[in-house]
Image (tube, helix red, strand yellow):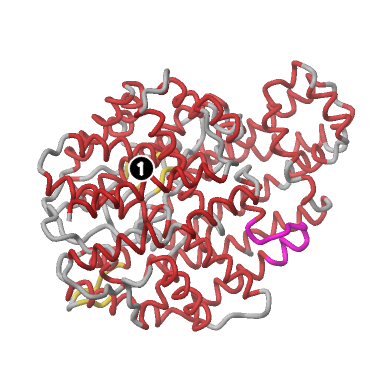
Amino acid sequence: MPRHPAQEKPAPAGGSVTPPDLPEWNLADLYAGPDCSRLAADLARAATEAEAFETTHAGKLATLAPAALAAAIGAYEAIEETLGRVMSFAQLFYAADQESPARGQFYQSMVERVTAITSHTLFFTLELNRLPDAVLDARLADPALARWRPWLRDLVVFRPHQLDDALERLLHEKEVTGPAAWNRLFDETLASMRVALGGETLTVNTALNRLSDPSRATRAAAAAAIGAAFTEKLPLFSLITNTLAKDKEIIDTWRKYPRPESSRNRANMVEDAVVDALVAAVCAAYPRLSHRYYGLKAKWLGLETLQHWDRNAPLPGEDSTEISWDEARTRVLNAYAEFSPEMAEIGRRFFDNAWIDAAPRPGKAGGAFAHPTVPSAHPYLLLNYHGRTEDVMTLAHELGHGVHQVLAASQGYLLSATPLTLAETASVFGEMLTFRAVLAATSDPAQRRLLLAGKVEDMLNTVIRQVAFYQFEQRVHAARRTGELLPEQIGEIWRGVQTESLGPAFTFAPGYDVFWAYIPHFIHSPFYVYAYAFGDCLVNALYAEYEAGAPNFQRKYLDMLRAGGALRHQELLAPFGLDAADPAFWSRGLNIISGFIDELEGAV
């Protein structure tokens, strides 16, 4: 799962880490290259198998005995995994250089080819969802279908929102010229943009890094230059946003989703009410969390008020020493090993087998993500490593995803996928382990305070900022339903949610109104972002159980990761005595952040 990219919490400026010092991934475990004969053979075989699958099973699922239905699901999974391997390679190959026309062309050709093939298997899930409950329940009672019960259980969630087969096929085939095409336009525009700053011409990701420079003048200049670059492209980014929001409204209306965010919640296997409780708890906590912390930060920086370019400013006395890649690896793996040798052993594979691409490069996708690929291969991690503490934590985060994906792969292709809320739990837990290990090894009170402040900022970015992003999306999608939004209207919504969430310590310069435009999750994955807040609060609760000495915690935690998508969040959390449906649960997680801020106030 991708982490919200580094532009959400920019990697700091500085450091002399160069690409030769950093690893680049080797995608040969998927395919040797875009012209690989095995890739062509896999596509040809999948096309033949998909057509045969449709001929054999379309219109006949209601008559299949349980064992035959289980075999059909297994055959469907095999086709899907082959195509998943193809698309994983295409996505990773493209992410390594989104400015390359040849890579963009290859990626688009794979999207179109795979879409055409899956048009022949689309009937399968649609027809399964049309089986009457009595028929499906009778099938599920048979041991032959035991393995597939969780997958069928989750499939039924979408039954009320399913359209007739012809419409579903039309939407499926038009995806390549609809949202997917707008996504690609956004990605390639962002990758090709350059920011003119101080006589340099920088990529967006590099310019965003300057917002963490120790010099306030440098940060201010970077903010102005970034604002100017995005203002120039604002009509295009506004058009993309308006078009995708309208497209979503049309689809949601046809599918009868009650709210714009409901389809995301269904995919996350979490109820609207649970997400509402999380968001309400976080919003109520703004004053005691972000408002309070940024008031402290303004005092530490000697400022009456902060500008947006001060949000990620390093604190006075903060260690700016570059952290080598080898040191980052050691810190993260040692922290993992202290918790669980098995976690560290899995994590070590990523470093030993060229499963990580860490070098910043022009054209490369910004930020960081972990791609699970397919169970028959292994995950890959993408980072843009700049040698600072924040980058070490990003490595810990993405490696948490990677370990989770390796463990869940035993469930197979259809059951290994984990809802975003729980996927982000694994990544944030990896960060927490690394932070706690670094903090425990630091005896100097001033350095401990700086480490704690850094962790608070990270948690605020994960919880407060992501919920503010979620509210931004809610308001944009609601406003779009009354007509197309002008860029200025989108900017007003952006400034409004930032003012509410960050509080009175900030005065926002007019140029900040365009900073919504570089956040890819709004384009690629509407309403994804609350999953980070969900994961952070859940990790706080889990870590409290671990610190309290809960019996067999490590085994229970790894079993939770191994479950993949086979269990719902209620079942996964039950062994820990936790219930995310309880409104008090979220307050418990937020109290951890508040306690850290209390400690910082006491240290001033």
Residue 497 x/y as whole percent: 47, 70
Residue 494 seen from this side: yes
What are the residue bounds of the magenta stretch?
A: 249-261
Q: Which residue is situated farthest in the front direction here?
A: 602
Read off the residue under disc 1: 397
Helix, strand or loop status at disc 1: helix
Residue drawn at 18 percent across, 49 percent down: 449
* Relative vertical location of residue 518 with respect to residue 15 in this rendering, above or below: below
- Between 283 and 521, the one lying in front of the other is 283
Quarter of the image with the C terminus is: bottom left
Residue 273 x/y as whole percent: 64, 50
Residue 346 located left or right of residue 186 = left
Rate crowding at label 1 as few (under 14), some (14 to 19) or many (20 or more) other CA atoms within 10 Å: many
Residue 556 x/y as whole percent: 47, 22
Give yes or no for residue 269 being in the magenta stretch.
no
Residue 132 located left or right of residue 250 = right
- Between 582 and 33, the one lying in front of the other is 582
Residue 236 located left or right of residue 24 = right
* Relative vertical location of residue 545 with respect to residue 97 in this rendering, above or below: above
Residue drawn at 56 percent across, 66 percent down: 182
- Between 540 and 417, the one lying in front of the other is 540
Q: Which residue is situated farthest in the top direction here?
A: 143
Q: In which quarter of the image is residue 287?
A: bottom left
Residue 583 x/y as whole percent: 56, 46
Q: In which quarter of the image is residue 136?
A: top right
* Relative vertical location of residue 301 with respect to residue 333 in this rendering, above or below: below
Residue drawn at 31 percent across, 40 percent down: 396
